[in-house]
Image (cartoon, rainbow, N blue to C red):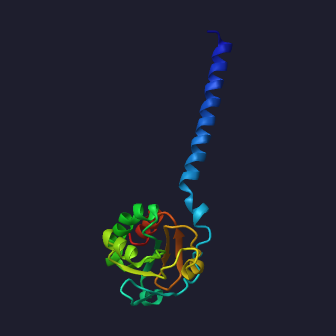
Amino acid sequence: MNIKHLRRATTALLVAFSLWSNTAKAQQSTEVDYDAQYASELVKPGTVAPNFELPSPDGMKVSLSQFKGKYVVLDFWASWCPDCRKDAPNIVDLYNRFKDKGVAFVGISFDVDAALWKAAIEKYGMNYAHASELKKMREANISKTYGVKWIPSMVLVDPEGKVVMGTVLWKKLERKLEQLFR
């Protein structure tokens, strides 16, 4: 093989590697950046989190204001949502890790069937506050108020009632909580 062929082969390999590398980077960024696609309309960090008062599974009222002075994770979900069911054990784990550090969790469901909602809470061991209008996401006032267009979605509120972050990725929530409670 002469030098001319060796240079061509080397150039072809470099071009192929470059194309592969750029394709891999593009795939990574689209796989990781779900918030840009699904969380863009959630309430914005720094804004005051809107108060709400919604029925709990036992008919009592749950409001954001009752958790004033604590960090609060609002977990928007539904029992029929495959991603919500997949993430439920991770959210429960976060609750168990941070509940004694002043973090309250409130599950806000978009179920329309109370029995299915309650069964899912029990099945996944979601032993924290829950609330629901028992309306579909697109019909529920809370989804409009918080800009929820996708579930699962999570909003973290600080002790003063301001939004810290909104995300559709429980891992981002985990990193933020770990950062706050080092």
Q: 106 or 103: which is nearer to us?
A: 106
Residue shown at the point (46%, 84%) measured from the top left: 159
**Quadrant containing the N terminus in the rendered view:** top right
**Is residue 126 at least partly visible in the picture?**
yes
The residue most toward the top is: 1
**Is residue 106 at least partly visible in the picture?**
no
Q: Position of residue 136 (x, y in %)?
A: 53, 75
Q: Position of residue 166 (x, y in %)?
A: 53, 71
Q: Is residue 42 left or right of residue 128?
A: right
Q: 27 or 4: which is nearer to us?
A: 27
Q: Position of residue 62 (x, y in %)?
A: 43, 87
Residue shown at the point (46%, 61%) measured from the top left: 83
Residue shown at the point (47%, 89%) measured from the top left: 65
Q: Quadrant of residue 148?
A: bottom right
Q: 44 or 6: which is nearer to us?
A: 44
Q: Position of residue 34 (x, y in %)?
A: 56, 59
Residue shown at the point (59%, 38%) measured from the top left: 21
Vertical order, 148 against 13 (above or below): below
Q: Quadrant of residue 130?
A: bottom left
Vertical order, 105 against 175 (above or below): below
Q: Is residue 92 left or right of residue 53?
A: left
**Quadrant containing the C terminus in the rendered view:** bottom left
